[in-house]
Amino acid sequence: MVQDRLQQIFREIFADDDLLVTDAMTAADVPGWDSLAHINLIYAVEREFSIQIADDRLASFATVGDMREHIEELSGVH
Amino acid sequence: MTERGDTAVAQGPGAAGSASDPRIAELMARAAATELPTARMCRDLAVAHERAGDAAGAVRWALALTDTDADLPAWSAVAGVLRRCVARTAPLGRTAQVAVLGSSTTSQFTALLPLAAARAGVAIETYECGYGQYRQEILDPDSGLYRFDPEVVVLAVHAGDALLPTLADDPDAAVAGEVLRWTSLWDTLRERCGARIIQHAFALPGESTLGHLTLRTAGARATLLARVNAELGRAAGDGVALVDCDRLAAEVGRRSWFDPRYWHRAKQAVSLAHVPLLARHTAAVLGAQLGASRKCLVLDLDNTLWGGVLGEEGLAGIALGDGAVGEAFAAFQEYALALRERGVVLAVCSKNNDADAREAFERHPGMRLRLDDIAMFSASWDDKPTQLRRIAAALGLGLDALVFVDDNPAEREAVRQLVPEVDVIALPADPHGYVRALAAYPFFETTAVTAEDAARTEAYRARAQLAAAEAAASSLEEFHRGLDMTATVVPLDELTLPRVAQLIGKTNQFNLTGRRRGAEEIARLAADPATTVLCVRLADRFADHGLVAVVIAVADGGALAVDTWLMSCRVIGRTLEDEVAGLLMAEARRRGLARVIGEYWPSPKNALVAGLYERLGYQRLDGPDDPSAPDVTRWARAVDEPYRPPGLMRVVSTSAPARPTATVIAQPRPRDRRMEEVPR
């Protein structure tokens, strides 16, 4: 399930095994989610789901939910 | 590498409590079920240990992760664990302030470098220049770079930074101009902060508009880049090291090394997938610059140097030299031999009858390695951890200088558990993969290849023979006299300078101040008439140990102040330091000075010389002068107080420039025109 794998990626990137990822979550909710962490996150997501997120979509993710939906769209995994 | 299992954790410092943590217990059980823990296991164990408050365990697993195929997210996660936990663990042998300068996004690289450096034995603090600011920071004397006062500057640049055209009309001028651009930045850096420099040499691009015509076109950009790399290597000399990024790029594939999506998106000049590899290799070069590289490769015999078990199959039954399998083992031996030729000391550690094992070296026609190539030959039925300790002791090396290679997973595991300081290389089951497994190990990196490097195995072998002679002599003094030792004071010149710089760069144990100076700085210091540089070679009837002791002292007021005093660990315990102390006193007298003053700067590795000045009759001076170094002790000795060195060796001086491998012992006995006894 995308949500579980996404949560694992977040836990890895932010080194926090208690992190619970929700659809409503934004960068402001996660300590350490700066531009550097963001590019690492995008890289990890692309690698985990074997997808390539288009550049114009990168800026359009307001929440984790937006990102999850786009991953589901591209990967066909739900 | 890694240590695992309940015993290892229970032994670890600060492990109390974490072994009973159920999460850790579960993860440890999983890790123990496999020889090499996966990246994921290492990462989970590092995080779990940190949560359980076991900083040492967390750091150990963080470092273990760097030896796996872990990807960037896992590296980033444990780099964070290391950052938070490292202050609460035993300090590493070396520390350094490292500045990373680049023109692209170097944040990931800079974040991972402390983890990679810790694995190489150096605790670093980093500074990262503003995005794209590398030239400005170097050229502006008031920049943050110089306020940081780095000991090492990493120029994390990439091919895009080379101002080379796609096709040059005048290739020679283009190359010369580009090389000058970088070497003048080096010069500015060294002038202003004396830092050592590590530059990422350029990875060649994966695409070429000229296609196969590139090789025939002197002005093609790829051709120019390759020449610039080579010219930078030639210009680097002492104090500048290059990371061969083109080799790394070729290893992973140039198209994989550079990812245009992340270049255009976030100015990642190296694909994020390979930033860990780049950090690891930069750290290996950094470790070598700071003298933290591994020195000795310890080889198993059966199924490592040849196929089969000698004790069962006999000399005629082992696979070596002929046939596909035999060729694989011969190729592995040849690789080990090439390592020995560039200065890595070789040792053998085998469970075998000593005579049988030696016979294989002497008689098997397929052997590439000879007994002469092995500094310490240990074949016995003792367990390997015991043999490894014996090898380290006989060679006068720390266990953390050894790298152990064995085909047997059980032996490797025993070594990891019982002598965790030793690095263990896991050979694959198929001997055709042995060379690659060994070649992938990065911590044999050195700063230069010198004449002494090639002779090192001989020097260490002589040292091991000495251990046997020492046991036979009834007293230490008798033993020393029987060695027929000659210390020769040689001048500092262009032939001895590289070796002096190498000794200063890497000597840890017998090193009173730990000041690391590069060749240029030494030459500059030595040019000052107030400075005395004593370079001493030592030879005995077993071996010529080469240039093994260096003292830099400066006449200051009425005293000769010792700036640097160090001695190679090969000759510790031979009373050479007592003779050098006598030379220092004589030099102070010659200059009409009243006292010799010395300092002891404690480090995790130089406890050996903590009591040196006191033993030599120096008086401790009051209080540290430098509040930033409160542990430093200062010592003085008046030159008119009588000093009598043990006199167990002849001390001579040669006024002629020393040849790198001049065999002093082979020359006629004293009173040679070029040699005179030094007055005591």
Image (cartoon, rainbow, N blue to C red):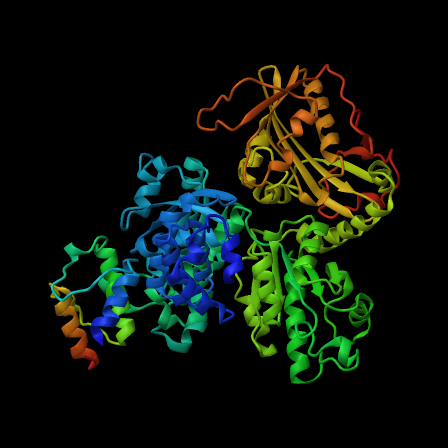
Residue B260 vs B91, above or below: the answer is below
- Residue B360, quarter of picture: bottom right
Q: Nearer the viewer, residue B643 or B190?
A: B643
Give me the residue at 75% from left, 54% from top: B461
Give me the residue at 57% from left, 23% from top: B634
Left or right, A66 with reference to B611: left
Image location (x, y in percent) of residue B289: 52, 48
Left or right, B638 with reference to B100: right
Residue B674 vs B52, above or below: the answer is above
Is residue B223 something one can see in this rendering? no
Image location (x, y in percent) of residue B562: 61, 27
Query: Exactly how many numbered labels are in the figure?
Result: 0
Give me the residue at 27% from left, 64% from top: B263
Left or right, B430 with reference to B157: right
Q: Nearer the viewer, residue B338 or B422?
A: B422
Give me the residue at 27% from left, 47% from top: B130
Left or right, B543 with reference to B190: right
Image location (x, y in percent) of residue B469: 84, 48
Q: Nearer the viewer, residue B261 or B87?
A: B87
Is residue B68 something one can see in this rendering? yes
Image location (x, y in percent) of residue B630: 48, 26
Q: Which part of the image, by quadrant, shows the C terminus of chain B?
A: top right
- Residue that lies at the very extreme toward the bottom in this rendered image: B323
